[in-house]
Amino acid sequence: MKNIKRDKSEEHTRMRGDERRALILAQANKIFAQKSYREASTGELARASGITEPILYKHFVSKKKLYLAVLKKLSEEFLERFRGQIARRSANYLLDCLTNFLLDYRKAAMQDHENIH
C-alpha cells in the first residue's frame, strides 16, 4: 500500500467542540423554525449540521435537550435585545421609558416570531 500525500489545502480541519455545538444549534434553529419538534428527526438535524447522529448525541443527549438548548439560546438573544432597547430608552425620562416598555417588549418578541414552532 502506498502512502498518499495530501495537499494541506485538501485536509479538513476539525472543528472545536464549542464551534461544532454552535453550528448544531444554528442548524437546529433553522429546522425547528420550519418544522415542529415532532416533525424534525434527529437524522435530519444531524445532516443539516454535516455530522452523524452519534455526534449529535455526543453534544446533546437527546432531541429534547437540543430543542431546549435552542429555546434557551433564542430566549437569551431576545432578552439581550430587549435589555438593549430599554437601556437606550433609559436616557429619556422615566415616564417615557415606562410608556415604551410594552412597545419594546412587543418589538423584541416580533423579531423572532417565525423562528420556532
Image (cartoon, rainbow, N blue to C red):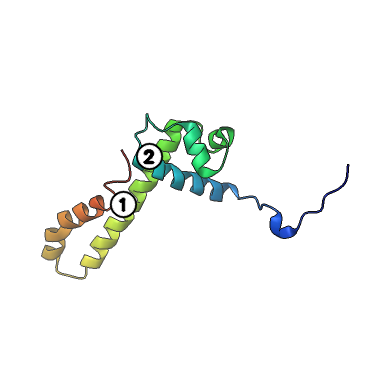
Q: Nearer the viewer, residue 69 or 7?
A: 7
Secondary structure of the residue carrying numbered label 1: helix
**Label 1 amino acid?**
Phe
Residue at x 45% of width, y 37% of height: 66
Residue at x 88% of width, y 46% of height: 2
Residue 4, position as x, y percentages in the image: 82, 50
Q: CA distance from mark 2 to mark 1?
A: 17 Å
Residue 75 as seen in the image, left or right of residue 48: left
Residue 96 as seen in the image, left or right of residue 56: left
Up-down relation of residue 64 to residue 16 (above or below) = above
Residue 80, position as x, y percentages in the image: 33, 56
**Which label belongs to residue 78?**
1
Residue at x 16% of width, y 62% of height: 97
**Which label belongs to residue 20?**
none
Closer to the N terminus: mark 2 or mark 1? 2
Residue at x 19% of width, y 52% of height: 106
The quadrant in which residue 108 appears is bottom left
Residue 72 as seen in the image, left or right of residue 19: left
Q: Nearer the viewer, residue 91 or 14?
A: 14
Residue 92, position as x, y percentages in the image: 17, 70
Q: Nearer the viewer, residue 82 or 3?
A: 3
Residue 34 as seen in the image, left or right of residue 8: left
Q: Residues within 10 Å of mark 1 (few under 14, many from 20)?
A: some
Seen as rendered, the residue at the extreme top is: 38
Q: Which residue is mark 2?
A: 32
Q: Residues within 10 Å of mark 2 (few under 14, many from 20)?
A: many
